[in-house]
Amino acid sequence: MRRDSHPAYGPVAFRDRSGDLLLTTRSTLVSTLPSDAETVEVDGTTVPVVDVEISSASHPFWTGRGRVVDTEGRVEAFRRRYGGER
């Protein structure tokens, strides 16, 4: 492999504020973060933080707060409104 051809790979923390989750892993995102990025201390190590909108802690599928869509009711309402089967 050629030297200096790959992006930096290091520890980073992904934070889902709505789900109260902080996941620490390694990523190439550390090379794209600005030098004044927010940091957090995890196990005595300071790592940059990347905020995410949705994670397994806040996604409706994983939390069980998802909606059940009544597709049969929608089809029947459409047929009542616009006529019978064609």
Image (cartoon, rainbow, N blue to C red):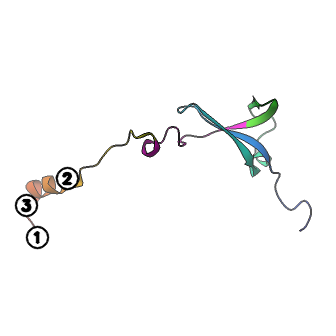
* Quadrant where the C terminus is found in the figure: bottom left
Badge 3, how many Cα within 10 Å: few under 14, some, many 20+?
few
Residue 33 position (above or below residue 81): above
Q: Which residue lies most toward the bottom here? A: 86
Badge 3 amino acid: Gly
Residues at discs 1 and 3 in contact (Cβ within 8 Å): yes
Task: State the extent of the magenta-drawn residues as a range.
Answer: 49-62
Look at mark 3 in the image and give the residue it sits on.
83
Look at mark 2 in the image and give the residue it sits on.
74
| Disc on res. 71 | none
Question: Is 78 covered by the magenta stretch?
Answer: no
- Label 2 or label 1, whichever lies nearer to me, is 2
Give the number of marks.
3
Residue 85 position (above or below residue 53): below
Badge 1 amino acid: Arg
- Measured Cα–Cα span from mark 2 to mark 1: 17 Å
Residue 4 position (above or below residue 63): below
Question: Is 50 covered by the magenta stretch?
Answer: yes
Q: Position of residue 73 (x, y in %)?
A: 17, 51
Badge 2 amino acid: Arg
Badge 2, how many Cα within 10 Å: few under 14, some, many 20+?
few
Q: Residue at x 30, y 46 (%)?
A: 68
| Disc on res. 86 | 1
- Label 2 or label 3, whichever lies nearer to me, is 2
Which sits earlier in the primary sequence, circle 2 or circle 3? 2
Q: Residue at x 78, y 40 (%)?
A: 34
- Measured Cα–Cα span from mark 1 to mark 3: 8 Å
